[in-house]
Amino acid sequence: MVLFVIFCPIIAAILIMVGAPARKTALAASVLTFGAAVFLLMSFDQEQHNFQHITSFTISLEWRLNFTTGVDGLSLIMVLLASIVTVAAVWFAGTIERYENAFYACLLFISGGAIGAFASIDLFFFYAFHELALIPTFLLIGIWGSGNRAAAAWKITIYLAIGSFILLLGLILLYQSLPPAWRSFDIRALQAGAAQGQIAVDAQRHVYLLLLIGFGILISLFPFHTWAPEAYASAPAPAAMLHAGVLKNFGLYGLLRLAIPLLPEGARHWTDLLLVLLLGNIIYVGLVTIAQKRLDWMLGYSSVMHMGYIFLGIASAGILGVTGAAVLIFAHGLSIALLFALAGELRQRTGTLVLDELGGLARVMPFAGLAFGFGVFAAIGLPGLANFAGEIMIFFGSFKNGWVMDRFHIFQIATVLALWGVVISTVYMLRAYRKTFMGTISEQWKELVDLRSGLRVPVALLVGALLCYGFFPQSFVRMLAPTFRTYLTTNTSPLTDMQTCSHSAVRRPPVVGLNDRNAPQVRGYNEGAWR
Amino acid sequence: MITAPELEITVLVLGMVILMAEAFATTNVDKRVLAFAAISGLAIVLLATFFVDPTTSTSQATGFWSFYTADRLSIVFKQFALVTTILVLIMMIDYAPVVRTSFPSARDGLGEFFAVPIFTCAGLMYLVSAIDFVFIFVSLELVTISFYVLVSFTRRNPVTLEAGTKYLVLSALSTAFLVYGIAWIFGVTGQTNLYRLTEALANPDVDRGAALLGMVFVLVALGFKIAAVPFQIWVPDVYQGAPTPVTAYLSVGSKAAGFVVLLRVLQPFLALPQTQRLIVLIALLTLIYGNLAALPQANLKRLLAYSSIAHAGYLLIGVVCFDVRAVTFYLVAYLLMTLLSFAVLIIVAQQAGEEISDYDGLARRSPFLAFAMLIGMVSLAGVPFTAGFLGKFFIFYAAIAQHQTILVIVGVLTVGCGFYYYLKVVRAMYWQSTNLAKIPVNGLSRLAISALVIATIWLGVYPQPILDALKR
């Protein structure tokens, strides 16, 4: 089933390149993928912390390289996010004038690459699948982009290429830092090795730095973020949705999957650096966002800024913060995809996204205005929408901070500063919303019509997911918890953390799946399962 | 059972037969028949190579006064040379109209155009088996002299003539360096056989400095063959001026043979600490120069020339680490993707031109060629699921294992440059639009290009066959 989810978009893309009707095939494939992802969700055993639905093909015995796919809680919600956003993006794409087949094939390649990366248990394919999206992104921005598309396309491609080669170095170094008997590209085997303390402290520090820079470039970590707003502003809306909503999460997923469980010592060593950088994301990029005059650039910067919160969760390295980070990845993916979709639609109708030229559009486009409002409020982090749960968990988690520090409490300061990010994002988001949809409508926009019913479906899908997830975050947290509990062996009291979260912050009943379980069988790595 | 030397003899005989047939055949025979005969002959030899038992020990010589070895590495590279030659001959068939127009009477030339590469192939096959300096010199000359003919084949074209002259002069110079270096080494150790040389160098009485001097001279000559900086001056002009199939042959065949010889020649000298440092320096210069100089190129053939220098840099990283398998895999990947790019280039060049701007809108004019070129370019750049990526992966793997930090850092940065100049071609093909006519592709070329595309992707996903071939 996992194989189907990965290869359905890729095969559909190849079919489209060969000559199948573009839009129909793409839509069918994305809906099928979504269906399969939901099926995976339904058949997923939440009590298990191991990977499930595993299939494996041997590529090279000598290098212990296998093409292994499977999902655990973390990768499953990533796959789910990818499939939801793919459906929305393909649906939104509509008719393309030039090279329609190539456009849809590129979209599906990005989607298939992202899903493949999320569902690969093998590091090599985890890496390779992500790169599958590189050339399609280059083409999507270059051929169908707007504005300064050439510069944007070059920038994103070269940034991502260098970033991913730095990442490759990190992965090779990780592989080599294990003693030969333990070497493997299999994430489970690596975790077993790390749990046994097979990765030397020195090596952990080096690898973590390489991974942080490599993934950081892919995620648009300050100061490597400059490619992101430009690329998202220039990209056609579906490409921006897929890239900002799904593909960028590859780096975050990678940090959660590799850096935290395998390299705790490295993470500890570089915490200060990461905190400074992520404050750059939140404060500096946040202020830059306020200064934006165009809606698409503002959304691009706001996406970069939100990466800061997620990094804060990752930096805290406690179960609460990390879970919050995963929750926020999902939520941010949905909300930014929704916002980019609507912004792209506005650009198509009005031909401009300069904030000062728009205004009062909610009068003629009430549905779009409502949906955009949901996206805006989600991005700000209003309770009831998905981002809130993630942000609150991150802030609590990082303020409490994953490990005991016997020196100056840099985490608390960072958290307090990061909280100002909420204010900053409120300022720019509400300002943009007011300038676009509220206020007096100028004469030239009075003829505009609202989204036609066909386009309301993907919007409703995204808003629905945001709401559903906002009101019932614990269903996802329950899926994530076993994974992270296995990871964070260094954490002193993961259970108390989770309870704090459930009671005081989210005010939800205690997470059942967590409490009725005894002290976790940490390092619960099952030898037999993967051999 | 077939023994290895029979392969080369067969190839040489095939070459002579085709030359004779060309000379004595009655008129009005389509010269392309000769090319097909050559291709099928080489294909049979290629098939035969799979039935040759490689010798178990590398040092075990099989005749020719212990000049010649048939170890696994040499068998793989004999197959490599044969595949390259077959593909180059297929390209030559496509290129035949250009050659024909450059001769006053249509009868001239074509026969030799198809026959000479067979001798080059025999030279390459001897070269990869050579374990004695004398034999290395002789087979290298066979390769080089046949290239003299090929490079300046369309001699009425002044650009080609310039390329031919440059190649001739600089190649002769490098040969002089080679002979001089061999003389120094022989003078110090009294040996020309590489394995006896290893023992001789272990002797403390030997003058290390003099041996090192000889090695440096040999390195200069080989640096010329593999297009390493600072011996790369000839590359852009010769590549641009030579007939395109010959350029492809030069950049793949000549370079691969150069690297095999480099690996064999360096083996005895690895004991000297200066050797590795010297090659690290050359590798760094080659990486930086090749990649930076490729950035502003507007002519695709010239771009591929600089890219060939850049790839020599990555291969030299493998040589520094002395990882034979990584180097070999990279060379195989390089063969596939370079020949793929040249195959497309030949077809497009006849309809449009060799400038990158001539590729504008190729996606419209021929989706097949554009896609093939896309695969070639992304593989050269190093995108996963192509052979080029795995080549870089193995090279970087070896370099990290040996803590060659500077090489790795420079390597990664130059990969970023590579993405820019290779994607420039992709941009031209897909971003720009045009309303020019479709470009037709004949059946044989379509087959060859498809095979190369599939092989490039196949090797990028499943590299094990090549790794296995080199293991035992």
Image (cartoon, rainbow, N blue to C red):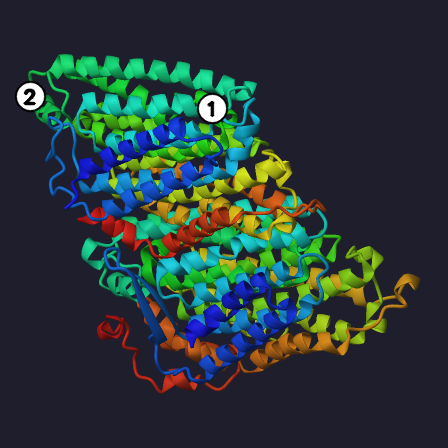
Q: Where the C terminus of chain A falls, by quadrant?
A: bottom left
Q: Residue at x 11, y 33 (%)?
A: B61
Q: Nearer the viewer, residue A16 or B343?
A: B343
Q: Nearer the viewer, residue A86 or A17?
A: A17
User: In this figure, what is the number of numbered marks?
Assistant: 2
Q: Where the N terminus of chain A falls, by quadrant?
A: bottom left
Q: Quadrant of residue A256?
A: bottom left
Q: Residue at x 52, y 29 (%)?
A: B99
Mark 2 lies on a secondary structure that is loop
Q: Nearer the viewer, residue B469 or A120?
A: B469
Q: Which mark is residue B203?
A: 2
Instruction: Determine crowd level at label 2: few under 14, some 14-19, many 20+ residues with C-alpha closer than 10 A.
Output: few
Image vertical order of residue A51 relative to residue A198, above or below: below
Q: Nearer the viewer, residue B226 or B164?
A: B164
Q: Position of residue B263 (x, y in %)?
A: 24, 32
- In space, the residues marked 2 and 1 are separated at their CA atoms by 49 Å
Q: Quadrant of residue B290?
A: top left
Q: Earlier in the sequence, mark 2 or mark 1?
A: 1
Which residue type does callout 1 highlight?
A: Phe
Q: Residue at x 53, y 59 (%)?
A: A248
- Res. A315 in view: no
Mark 1 lies on a secondary structure that is loop
Q: Position of residue A379 (x, y in %)?
A: 63, 67
* Residue that label 1 marks: B153
Asked if labels 1 and 2 touch by Cβ distance under 8 angstroms, the answer is: no
